[in-house]
């Protein structure tokens, strides 16, 4: 499949296309769960268009499905989206300068996947990093919204994306995208400690906390001056 | 208002808050980002968040630690990455390993 459809694309765009397909497929689950929670097809589509952040959207319909109120759904969704704010800070050196409307749109495209593909490209190749961000952001946006409609209409009949191994594919994709930035010992230590902390917190804190807490490890390690320039995972 | 209308208010509100969170990161002042310490922390933060996300996706389900077919799939993926396999191969093989294991067990 890769040889046929992705030939001729550079690494940033190849990653963008494969991540878009793997992520977009998950909109089947979202669409189905949203309708099962009692939202109609239009409301389900609006969540994908306006919130456009998988974790936040699953949390929103999860709260509604569990009988929670609309305010609780908004609060949980917003909390799970907080990490996107950190991504914008990390992406700023890559994407600036940006004009007003471009920045408005770039903000909307700022998600786990677009950030990961962008920053997986070499730090000295700003063009590749920009291509990775925009191709992934727009690619996921198109597929996520299109497949949300399919999930809302026929989702439960198609089944669980996990049956096709897509949950493992998404995890492997993020591992592959962070991989090139784990060259230095401090970067490896940050990654390892983040994973351990997230797993320890998962059973005892609300969703969203385990991932956000990893930012504390980054602050601790980034606070001290590096012994060499190469140790910071640019 | 009806509960149907309130749901629409909630959806639009969640959308605005999601966008505002993202936008806030993009408008952090340039001078602040040029501080070397802030610059380092910002670089480590993306590694920390994305790797924590990987761990949660690979080893948890609905708030519990779960070791299932995903563990084998990401272990195979790690070996392939270490052997410098192309990205698309890593992703497709991980999906295939998990799907086949679930089919068998």
Image (spheres, coloured by chain):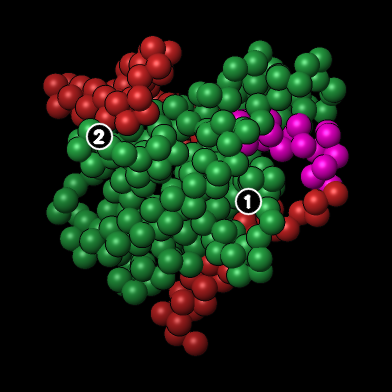
- In the image, which residues are magenta? B32-48
Q: Which mark is residue A95?
A: 1
Q: Is residue A17 visible from the viewing direction of this image? A: yes
Chain that is coloured green in the picture? A
Q: Chain of mark 2?
A: A
* Quadrant of the rendering where the C terminus of chain A is positioned: top right
- Quadrant hosting residue B52: top right
Label 1 chain ID: A
- Residue drawn at point x = 85 percent, y = 22 percent: A225
Quarter where residue B5 is shown: bottom left
What secondary structure is the stretch in magenta mostly built from?
helix
Whole-number angstrom distance, CA of label 2 to CA of label 1: 28 Å
Sort mark 1 into few (<14), some (14-19) or many (20+) by Cα contacts within 10 Å. Answer: many
Magenta-colored stretch includes residue B44: yes
For the point 80% across and 51% down, which residue is it?
Answer: B30
Disc 2: which residue: A2
- Residue shown at 60%/41% (left/top)? A126
Depicted A44 relative to depicted A225: above or below: below
């Amino acid at each position: 499949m890769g040889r046929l459809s992705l030939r001729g694309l550079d690494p940033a765009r190849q990653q963008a296309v494969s991540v878009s397909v793997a992520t977009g497929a998950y909109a089947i689950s979202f669409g189905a769960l949203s309708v099962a929670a009692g939202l109609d097809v239009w409301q389900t589509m609006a969540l994908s268009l306006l919130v456009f952040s998988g974790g936040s959207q699953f949390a929103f319909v999860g709260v509604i499905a569990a009988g929670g109120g609309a305010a609780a759904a908004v609060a949980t969704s917003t909390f799970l989206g907080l990490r996107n704010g950190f991504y914008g800070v990390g992406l700023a050196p890559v994407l600036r300068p940006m004009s007003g409307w471009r920045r408005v749109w770039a903000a909307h495209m700022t998600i786990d996947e677009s950030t990961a593909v962008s920053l997986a490209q070499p730090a000295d190749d700003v063009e590749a990093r920009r291509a990775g961000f925009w191709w992934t952001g727009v690619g996921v946006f198109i597929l996520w919204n299109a497949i949300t409609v399919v999930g809302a209409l026929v989702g439960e009949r198609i089944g669980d994306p996990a049956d096709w191994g897509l949950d493992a594919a998404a995890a492997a994709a993020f591992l592959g995208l962070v991989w090139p930035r784990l060259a230095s010992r401090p970067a490896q230590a940050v990654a390892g400690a983040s994973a351990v902390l997230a797993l320890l917190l998962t059973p005892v804190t609300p969703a969203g906390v385990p991932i956000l807490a990893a930012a504390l490890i980054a602050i601790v390690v980034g606070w001290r001056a590096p012994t060499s320039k190469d140790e910071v995972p640019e | 208002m009806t509960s149907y209308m309130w749901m629409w208010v909630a959806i639009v509100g969640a959308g605005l808050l999601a966008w505002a969170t993202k936008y806030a990161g993009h408008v952090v002042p340039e001078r602040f980002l040029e501080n070397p310490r802030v610059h380092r922390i910002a670089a480590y933060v993306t590694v920390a968040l994305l790797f924590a996300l990987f761990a949660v996706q690979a080893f948890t389900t609905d708030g519990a630690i779960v070791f299932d077919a995903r563990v084998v799939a990401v272990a195979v993926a790690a070996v392939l990455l270490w052997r410098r396999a192309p990205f698309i191969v890593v992703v497709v093989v991980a999906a295939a390993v998990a799907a086949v294991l679930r089919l068998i067990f």
